[in-house]
Amino acid sequence: MLEFKTGHINDAALITDIGARSFIESHGKSASETDIRNYVQSKFNIPQLESELADDNSIFQIAYYNQEPTAYSKITLNCPNPNIAEQKVCKMDRLYVLEEYFDKKIGQVLFDLNVEIAKQ
């Protein structure tokens, strides 16, 4: 069963874990081990995620498959783009899915959920 929960500051460790694991699974061989490690340490750490989760313009969604955390997304509200006339633009910042759940199509469902949230 697939469920979604809006992420809050107390989810920082969980989101950090999903993000780091899925980034390494997807990009772990695209650069040197040192570069990958440095990127993961700078982007997927609890203080960084707590700061992002505290931002009122950031909306995180965590996906659970059979009660196991499997993926997360982040959208940013009110993110103007110089190429778009509308100023209240919503930006998809991240969508990370653990590799073992790729066959469940969680990424597509999570993306669709974010489109609906952005429309609101």
Image (cartoon, rainbow, N blue to C red):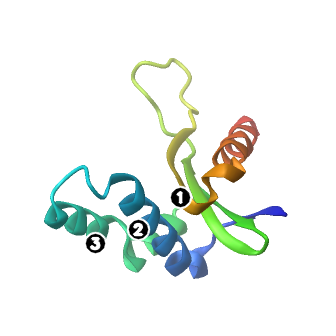
Q: Position of residue 3 (x, y in %)?
A: 80, 63
Judging by the rendered image, the residue that carries numbered circle 3 is: 41
Q: Residue at x 23, y 62 (%)?
A: 36
Judging by the rendered image, the residue that carries numbered circle 1 is: 99
CB atoms of marks 1 and 3 within 8 Å:
no
Q: Position of residue 26 (x, y in %)?
A: 40, 53
Q: Residue at x 53, y 67 (%)?
A: 53
Quarter holding the N terminus? bottom right
Q: Where is residue 49 in the image (x, y as percent from the top left)?
A: 45, 70
Q: Is residue 20 left or right of residue 35?
A: right
**Disc 3 on helix, strand or loop?**
helix
Mark found first going from the N terminus, 2 or 1? 2
Amino acid type of the residue tagged 3 in the rendering: Gln
Amino acid type of the residue tagged 2 in the rendering: Ala
Q: Nearer the viewer, mark 2 or mark 1?
A: 1
In the rendered image, is residue 106 in sight?
no
User: Which quadrant of the figure has residue 119?
Assistant: top right
